[in-house]
Image (cartoon, rainbow, N blue to C red):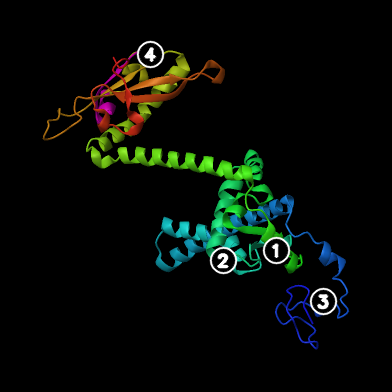
Amino acid sequence: MQCARCNWQNPAAHKVCFNCNAPLSLAPSAAGSPAPAAARDTRVFASFWARLGATAIDASFMVGAIVVLCLAASYTYQGLTGDHRPTVLLLAAGLLGWLLPAFMDAWGNGSPGKRLLKLRVVTRQGSAPGLLRSFWRHTLKYTLNVALPGIFHHLQQTIFGERAVHNSLAGTHVVSSQADPRKVNAAVATAPAVTGAGKFLITVFGVLALVLAGIVLGAVALDKDEDSPLRAEVAHLDRVSDPIRRVAESHYQRTGTFAPDIAALGITQASLDAIGFSRLDLNPVNGVLRFTIAGEPGTAESPSLGGRHLAYLPELRSEKKGGGVRRWQCGSDDIPREDRPYGCRHETGAFAR
């Protein structure tokens, strides 16, 4: 007797399928009577709303799993060692919670959302996805579909059709778990992978991604701290001068004018000395802050920032957006460009005095 669910050929005396344990009463009779109407009419591919509902359920499940696993790992570690739990342990526990639906899609009967809504993930051969394929699909799904909703959904429909980007790139399909396996195999075998417009857009976006990656890698390569022994010191001085810039912002927001000197900001020489500056000049016209770095001038054998300057030009918001200082442009007129971090490379010779 042939099983209607998995197509396994069983002996006539069996009441349940040897392969999938389905009742053999669901199988067609020897006379060739058709399968029940419910089995024939079940839609193979899951609808968008069913997949969206499963995603929402899985997302809630993941959040709960991450919280529970992180707390369990933290309390267990503290109980066993008496020490504060390391960050890497929490990251590992959180990653495990985030990947739990992928484990269940690969090794079980599906993630909680898919099991509740009678769905499952299959490959083009109709089998469950392997672990690596499931991880890849899960990562694409929650970094693209959830992080970029709305417009991205319509864009990916143009490129990938109803399958969505994560299924197309992972080579998977979401189907009804109640559909006839023979129909599932036939449907996924003939399903189009990517539309014609999608192939064109993938090529364009792929080239743009490679160009962008090259630019980022080039910027990182050109901005290595090892190239300049003074760059880390400039970055440190940029950070410690931030509170003074905040005070200057507050003064401008409160009075509508730039402070003429450090006394107007309530800053003392002792406070400047404590953070590594010997002098601070303020321009009441354009609001420029010009810090003189403390220390002795350097030499070719022993480079130093002593006596050099960091300057900050305020960039103002429009009155429609509330006014005030939007950000500070950092630069210097006497520290070489290669000795300054990327965010402090404005040429300030024209406005720093």
Q: CA distance from mark 2 to mark 1?
A: 18 Å
Secondary structure of the residue carrying tag 2 is: loop
Residue 78 in sight here: yes
Amino acid type at circle 1 is: Arg
Part of the protein shown in magenta? 269-285
- Going from N to C along the chain, the mark reached first, 2 or 4, is 2
Q: Position of residue 265 (x, y in %)?
A: 36, 20
The residue sitting at 84% across, 78% down in the picture is: 25
* Residue corresponding to mark 1: 115
Residue 223 in sight here: no
Q: CA distance from mark 2 to mark 4?
A: 63 Å
* Residue corresponding to mark 3: 27
The residue sitting at 73% across, 74% down in the picture is: 6
- Going from N to C along the chain, the mark reached first, 2 or 3, is 3
* Residue corresponding to mark 2: 130
Queried whether the magenta region covers residue 283, the answer comes back as yes
Q: Characterize the local packing of mark 1: few (<14), some (14-19) or many (20 or more) Cα atoms within 10 angstroms.
A: some
The residue sitting at 58% across, 51% down in the picture is: 142
CB within 8 Å, label 3 to label 4 = no
Q: CA distance from mark 2 to mark 3?
A: 30 Å
Front of the two marks 2 and 4:
2
Q: Characterize the local packing of mark 3: few (<14), some (14-19) or many (20 or more) Cα atoms within 10 angstroms.
A: many
